[in-house]
Image (cartoon, grey):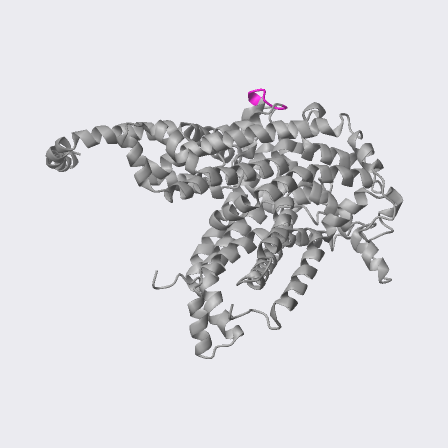
Amino acid sequence: MTEVSVAVKPGRAVQEPARRGRTRSTKRSRREARAAYLFLAPWFVGLLVITIGPIFASLYLSFTDYSLLEEAKWIGFDNYVKMFTEDPRFVASLKVTTIYVIVSVPLQLAFALALALVLDRGLRGLPLYRSIFYLPSLLGGSVAIAILWRKVFGAEGLVNSVLAVFGIQGQGWVGHPDYALGTLILLHVWTFGAPMIIFLAGLRQIPSSYYEAAAVDGAGLLRQFKSITLPLLTPIIFFNLVLELIKSFQSFTQSFIVSGGKGGPADSTLFYTLYLYLQGFKNYDMGYAAAMAWVLLLIIAGLTGVNFLASKYWVFYGDTK
Amino acid sequence: MLFRPLKGGPVVRHILLIGFGLVMLYPLLWMISSSLKPEELIFREPGLWPSEITFENYSEGWFALKHPFGYYLWNSAVITGLSVVANLVACSLAAYAFARLNFPLKAFWFAIMLGTIMLPHHVTIVPQYIMFSELGMINTIWPLVMPKVLATDAFFIFLMVQFIRTLPRELDEAAEIDGAGYWRIFIRVVMPLCMPALATTAIFTFIWTWNDFLSQLLYLNNPDNFTVPVALRTFLDASSDSSWGPMFAMSIIALGPIFGFFLAGQKYLIRGVATTGLK
């Protein structure tokens, strides 16, 4: 204790003259800080009341049995244990969501990259194409589009009536446990426009002199793509991957509407967040829902962490910048 | 350009792109065309041009629920409008502080702000619901608008910080020499130059709030307070699997404003996505 205070005092004494010399700027910086905190006041309140407070509250609730009407009852890790040992629907929702994420995100990014490559470099009408391909990204999360999807892939839907033209008898895709999730994956892939625009912006950053030099050295298109485009684009691919993984793990509206709020048939479209909603706001098992939310947070944090660790091995940040 | 990713030149590329674009947009066009067809033709005709045009689906859908559909459009418009204003004000205030002012722990708070962008909404949703229900705010607009007033859409703070950082600081300094305080610099110098970022924020807030389903589903359960997404969902539950014309008609009306904002603000949308990676 005493040692510490002794160690601190000389430091202060040394600082003192310098401080006095800057009284004017200190005064100014104090005024500036006060202004900053005023500008940030709404954000601080929101951070506390809407974000940080609820995060800890939900951590606490996750260890309780709570139904909004009765007092929360502390039950330790019971919610977490129950999830993985006694709740097949939880396991199903985790499985469904994982499949959805693992299949739809790479597919979506592949489409985004492919279209960005086709659109890049002086194609006429680029703004028009870009807008057309981007539009589904804006609409994709809406209830209206989910309704459309349910009908497009319904028993009496667009897909089947097109198939009928070719004499093929289709089936109710959204009503079949083997195909329902596939329709949701397609819906996600359909919204490739947003990452495509990010890819296009990234492609524009690559100097065309690189390609010219490569061509002089006799590199073909494929070689140029492999040795120039792809490596220089890896930071953007990584960025899109992190973003889309986080986002798609939280998809809700599509599965809710397409399955009529139940996650069927046979829980085949029971997204994690849909099950969380059903537990928390239909069964009013809010402790359980809070525990599910924390598991989701840990999954997303873990996934993002692994992504960042793995990025060392494949993301190329260049050595000149 | 010297190099093209595809052989065969631009013609082949255009044909491929147009074909692909058509396939992508086909479901949307089909929905528009179906909304204009008599019910019994929707499944029988996969083509886009209706052999018989009727507006019956629209009039039937408009009055299918407890209130005429315009009522829900208005509810959505109120919540969306307030959200846009709240986001513009609250996020630009915070962004100015992060971009231009120095204060203790700035880097720390900035990191926290970025962290909240990545935070899954579901982690806070249960306690938020409990809080708003304790406050007696279920079935009011507060749970939907309050978070925006308090700048919890950190996306937009980040977007505007990035934008303000590109503005020359000399302008701020010149204003300061003229005796302007921080507030005046913010209002008179920085904000007018931020118009593109403000436009992006406004358009994205509009589209996201208009589309938002989960929070509106949670907080609005009285049909008198329903917004468009919740009303559509009720409509879906109420209609049988064979009656789709009116549903489609109302879905198209629901998508209309988004489409309008998309047409009007494409430039800002695309720039916003390209610079920050927003959806």
* Left or right side of B84 for B24: right
Question: Bounds of the magenta span?
Answer: B134-139
How many badges with numbers are in the image? 0
Residue A185 in the image: x percent, y percent? 66, 53
Which one is nearer the viewer's eye here, B89 or A68?
A: B89
Q: Is residue A41 above or below residue A179?
A: above
**B136 is within the stretch colored magenta:** yes
Which one is nearer the viewer's eye here, A317 or B131?
A: A317
Q: Residue at x 54, y 45 (%)?
A: B269
Q: Residue at x 73, y 53 (%)?
A: B26
Is residue B104 shown to the viewer in this render?
no
Q: Is residue A171 above or below residue B145?
A: below
Quarter placement of the C terminus of chain A: bottom left
* Left or right side of B231 for B164: left
Quarter placement of the N terminus of chain A: top left
Residue A240 in the image: x percent, y percent? 51, 54
**A194 is within the stretch colored magenta:** no
* Left or right side of B218 for B42: right
Is residue B172 shown to the viewer in this render?
yes
Q: Residue at x 53, y 32 (%)?
A: A61
Predominant SS along the magenta part: loop
Which one is nearer the viewer's eye here, B86 or B224?
A: B86
Which one is nearer the viewer's eye here, A24 or B191?
A: B191
Residue B186 in the image: x percent, y percent? 38, 31
Q: Residue at x 59, y 46 (%)?
A: A84
